[in-house]
Amino acid sequence: MLKTMQNQWFSNIRGDLLAGIVVALALVPEAIAFSIIAGVDPKVGLYASFCIAVIISFTGGRPGMISAATGAMALLMVTLVKDYGLEYLLAATLLTGVLQIVAGYLKLGDLMRFVSRSVVTGFVNALAILIFMAQLPELTNVTWHVYAMTAAGLGIIYLFPYVPIIGKVLPSPLICIISLTIVAILFNIDIRNVGDMGQLPDTLPIFLWPDVPLNLETLTIILPYSVGLAVVGLLESMMTATIVDDLTDTESDKNRECKGQGIANIGSGLLGGMAGCAMIGQSVINVKSGGRTRLSTFSAGIFLLVMIMVLDEWLQQIPMAALVAVMIMVSIGTFSWDSLRKMRKHPLSTNIVMVTTVVVVVATHNLAIGVGVGVLLAAMFFANKIGHFMHVSSTINDAGTERQYHVTGQVFFSSADKFVASFDFKEAVDKVVIDLTRAHFWDITAVGALDRVVLKFRRDGAEVEVLGLNEASATIVDRFGVHDKPGAADEIMGGH
């Protein structure tokens, strides 16, 4: 117990605290921006980011991952806030948390194993593109000072690590933010800063039960939104956890993460915050800044609260150009450049799945749709590939009266037609033996194909023997097959 706590909380104190400061600084403008997207006061996003980060540090299944208010979730809230107001959003946030906890107990986090590597790569690349695109408004119709500050920020981020001693100690994104803020203040450079994005809160969050009627009508209103928020939140969190797993060469508990996200969202809703989930951008910032344990996530939430309560005047003076530079660094670091270099080596199907996932996510700005399309495509390609591995060969006895068919491979919905087409029903033989020793039947489509083959041969007067079924195949054939049951010929062949 103590060893686990040491590893997950106090094994990297300096790196975690410094990373927490960087993440907290980057969370401020994002939380405000996401609040504006959702149509609520900036403090709703800031309170949510603080609450979720602190709670998930205790309840989550992925140490070092940052969860807070996110743009993907904010986009789903727009209509609810516009039509019904903030109180219904808070109620929907609570229900979202409940649904995510249920998902955790149902072990839906295990479904991540069905998401192929090409879909994850597409998801990562799409997010990198979206992160970069989100910075473009800050670089459009602005003075040359903004471009100069952004370029200087990128220079600091990528060159500071080469400075002897301190370059390895202090995270370069933090140095970037501090340096550009000092320059902007000293030279009184008139550029957009954090304070221009909205008013920061000046009070601590308080317990706030949503002021909505507790009846079926309210449930009818918030349930569709809560389901959408829960699905997108868990999907983004699971994908982000997978990415952080790869970055840190460690494993995470996906089902615990589902429950943790739910508890964090309930906490956020009760303290006046909106629903949130894991943030790939901030998680990458955290990891690249040296954050590894739960302390980094906890400190990010605490530093965020301290900053907006104590250092609000200073925070408001941080130039957006500094944060744009940090986010551009994140987008560059997030994008899987290796996936482009290896496109010639990878199978065409892998490239199609990856590119399609990127295109759909970027076009719709909806992670769930993009990943869903990617998973569907990957499943179709897999089924088609496995279907080609089914082969039927045959031999005939010296007298020419008995034909023996040998089936090898997987028989299921994709290969069922090929299975049927592999038999010669016009050949005049007295007996047909179908050897399934090296085959496996997976579904009722495969069983139906076997029924058709057996009954077609019997209709033409041949004796049919089926042998070699393994236990699993025999079970499904006995349960759903009809070729050995009375009236089977009329049932199967009647329409042919």
Image (cartoon, grey):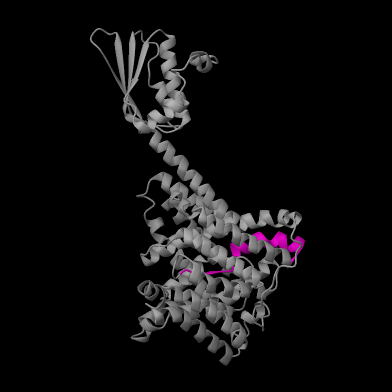
Membership of 268 in magenta stretch: no
At 76% across and 60% down in the image, what residue appears? Answer: 83
For the image shown, how many numbered marks are present on the structure?
Answer: 0
Q: Is residue 1 left or right of residue 352?
A: left
The answer, for residue 416, to whether it is visible in the render is no
- Residue occupying the far bottom of the picture: 186
- Work out whether residue 357 or residue 77 is closer to the camera in this orientation and state it: 77
In the image, residue 442 sits, relative to residue 368, either above or below, namely above
Q: Position of residue 239 (x, y in %)?
A: 48, 59
The magenta segment is 65-85
When the figure is inspected, residue 195 is found, relative to residue 337, above or below; the finding is: below
Regarding residue 296, the answer to whether it shows in the image is yes
Position in image of residue 252 (x %, y %)? 42, 62
Question: Which residue is depicted at the point 40% across and 33% down?
Answer: 387
- Asked whether, in this view, residue 351 is left or right of residue 494, the answer is left
Closest to the observer: 7 or 375? 7
Q: Nearer the viewer, residue 394 or 443?
A: 443
Residue 276: name its quadrant.
bottom right
Please name the predominant secondary structure of the magenta segment in the image: helix
Determine the residue positioned at 46% across, 51% down. Answer: 115
Q: Residue at x 53, y 49 (%)?
A: 372
